[in-house]
Image: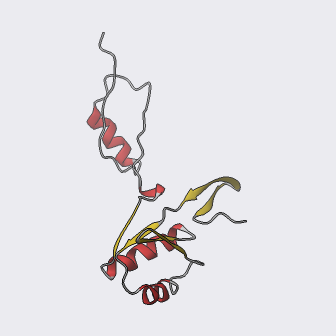
Amino acid sequence: MEDVGQEWKTVEGKKKRRERVPPIVLNDVTHWKTLLNEMTKIPGGIIEAKTVGSNIKVKAQSVQQHKDLYKYLESIDAKFYTHQLDEEKNAKIVIRGLPLSLTAEEIKEELEIQNFKIIKVIRLHKKS
């Protein structure tokens, strides 16, 4: 049985954990058959859908299919919600052993030179 909603990420030929693809939950769907016909035209495999209360939970097979579904639902002004993709989440990183003479601004500039998207830099150190 294949895991739906996850895809393998490989690094240098090694298998890594599967990347989670969050479901999209549709609210107030009035024309489900029409919507389903349009969603099945989106490439990427079978779209799995089931009712959850008064909502419809849609699972994409891949991250790209999830993005395409999201764009399509936004374009038709559908009422829906989903969670952030793992790749869109911000990483919080701690760098240890930096000299106290470096300022937060210098650290930020150096990380930006190395193509990191920086939101905030905080210097943590013990005051003696």
Q: Is residue 20 left or right of residue 11?
A: left
Residue 86 location, x and y as percent? 47, 55
Residue 97 location, x and y as percent? 44, 24
Q: Is residue 38 left or right of residue 27?
A: right
Q: How is the image coloured?
A: secondary structure
Q: Residue at x 48, y 83 (%)?
A: 39
Q: Quadrant of the N terminus?
A: bottom right
Q: Residue at x 37, y 78 (%)?
A: 73
Report which quarter residue 101 is drawn in.
top left
Report which quarter residue 93 is drawn in.
top left
Q: Residue at x 37, y 43 (%)?
A: 111
Residue 77, placed above or below residue 16: below
Residue 70, placed above or below residue 106: below
Considering depth in this image, is 93 or 61 the residue closer to the camera? 61
Report which quarter residue 80 is drawn in.
bottom left
Residue 5 location, x and y as percent? 57, 65
Residue 14, placed above or below residue 65: above
Residue 123 location, x and y as percent? 31, 29
Q: Is residue 70 left or right of residue 11?
A: left
